[in-house]
Structures are given as structure tokens and as C-alpha cells.
Image (cartoon, helix red, strand yellow):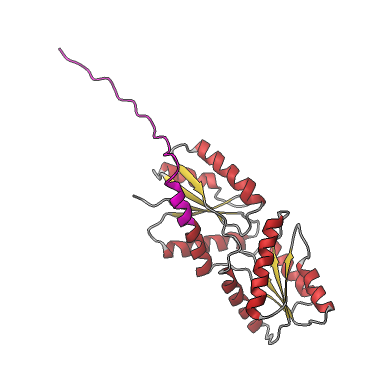
Amino acid sequence: MTAPALVVLAHGSRDPRSAATVHALVKCLREMRDDLRIEASFLDHCPPTPYQVLGKLAAEGVEEVVVLPLLLSAAYHARIDVPAVLDEARSRFPNLRIIASDVLGYDDTLLDVLDRRMRAELKGGRVRELDALVLAAAGSSDSHANASVTRLARLWGQRHRLPVTAAFVCAASPSPAEAVLQWRLEGRRHVAVGSLFLAPGVLPDRAETTSRRAGAVAVSAPLGVSAEVARLVLLRYGVAGLDLLTLEPAPRPVIARPELVRTA
């Protein structure tokens, strides 16, 4: 039995660094699992669309696909955009069996990546002392998604025995700059900001610029490509692949058979 194809579905950005990161992650995944067909696609702003990728796979005879939303938050895009994409894809390609995996989520293993990015930033900036942390994420109107960031921030602080604040660039408060300023008002002068974003783009840039203006001594780079992120992708893929076994088979095309010609 051939394993389902994996289509990574990223949000997309006008910033070319974002798409480059997604394609680099797909390259990493292919190196880890050279037995799988793995493709990148984007919801918006840059090609290819999921329909272009799924159409190509269908034309090549692929029968099963796992679509993996490359998102940290199970908020609006995961609840609204991704199901809409799948409904439309199933309508366009009825011979494909398609299932969406869970989003990556704010998994604890991401803290290992965050620490490496932060250590690199601290070393580059020759920062030798910290007395508070801020964990900066995109933010959502979904309180459950924001609560997941807060939980991860608490774990990060416990790991380093430092006080930490979860902060959000959009849709929730405090902002990263507000969180930095609050720590400084309390007398903590060495505040570092961890960038909880998968790839560079507008929101991480905003978090960095405003945090540094507020007095942050370091702002880490986004998570980017790492073995931890790749393994998390493959874990979500594996669970969804098992769920495919419970789905009804996609209808196979009916091939008309010519009537037999009887000869006297």
C-alpha cells in the first residue's frame, strides 16, 4: 500500500522569506522521509494554491492525501479556511481521498528550538544577563489559542527560572512592547523576547521592532526550519494517515465497456 501524499498548507505571506522557509522545511521533510510524496502549498499571497497541488497529484494518479495546516494556532484559519479548502478540493477532485491533519500547535518541543534561537541571539548581541522573558506570538480572537501560548510561556519561564509574560502582536494583549515596558517599570532591565513564529514576515518583524524600541536587550529569530518542527509535522501526518483508513473510499471512475459483438 502506498503511503498518502503529504501536502503542507501554509498561510502564505507577501514576504518572500516566509515562502522560502516553507520550501526549506519541505526539503528537510523529503530528506527525512524520501519514501513520501511531499509538496508545499499556500492559502494566500503566493503560489502554488492547494488546488494546483492537489490537481497535479490527482492527474498523476495519487489516491490519498493528507493536508497538513502549517499553523501553530487552531484558531480562525484552522477552523474556517482549512475546512473550506478541503470541501472545495473534494468537490473538484472526487477521486482523491483527502483528510486534514491537526495543526502543529504550541507543542512543548518547540521550546527547544526557541532556546537555540535565543542562545544565538544572546551570543550575537553579547548579552550575558537576563531577568525577565516575553514570549511573542501572533495572537487570536480565540481565547483558547491565546491560553495555549500562555501555557507554553509558563513552561519556558520554569525551564529558565525567569518570570515570563505571553504577548500578542494582534487581537489580544499585552503586545510584546507593552510586556517589555511592564517588566522595565518593575525594575527588570534585561528583558529578552522569544519569537514564537514559524517563519519571518510582517508580524515577527513588528514584534522585533516594537520590542527593541521598548528596551528589549534581545529578540530571537522565528523558529524556522528545524528537526523538531519537521518531526512534529510527520507526527501530525502519521495520525491523520491512520484516520484515512476509517474514511469511505473515494468513488472510482466508471469505465464503459463496449458491447460484445456476436458473429454468426
Whether the magenta-drawn stretch holds residue 29 is answered as: no
Q: Residue at x 82, y 74 (%)?
A: 182
Q: Residue furthest right?
A: 185
Q: Is residue 234 above or below residue 219?
A: above
Which one is in front, 22 or 164? 164
Q: Is residue 126 above or below residue 28?
A: below
Q: What span is in magenta?
A: 237-264
Quarter of the image with the C terminus in it: top left
Q: Residue at x 64, y 72 (%)?
A: 155
Which one is in front, 121 or 47? 121
x, y percentage for residue 197? 64, 64
Which one is in front, 79 or 10? 79
Q: Residue at x 70, y 62 (%)?
A: 203
Magenta: main secondary structure equals: loop
Q: Is residue 155 above or below residue 86?
A: below
Q: Is residue 242 above or below residue 202?
A: above
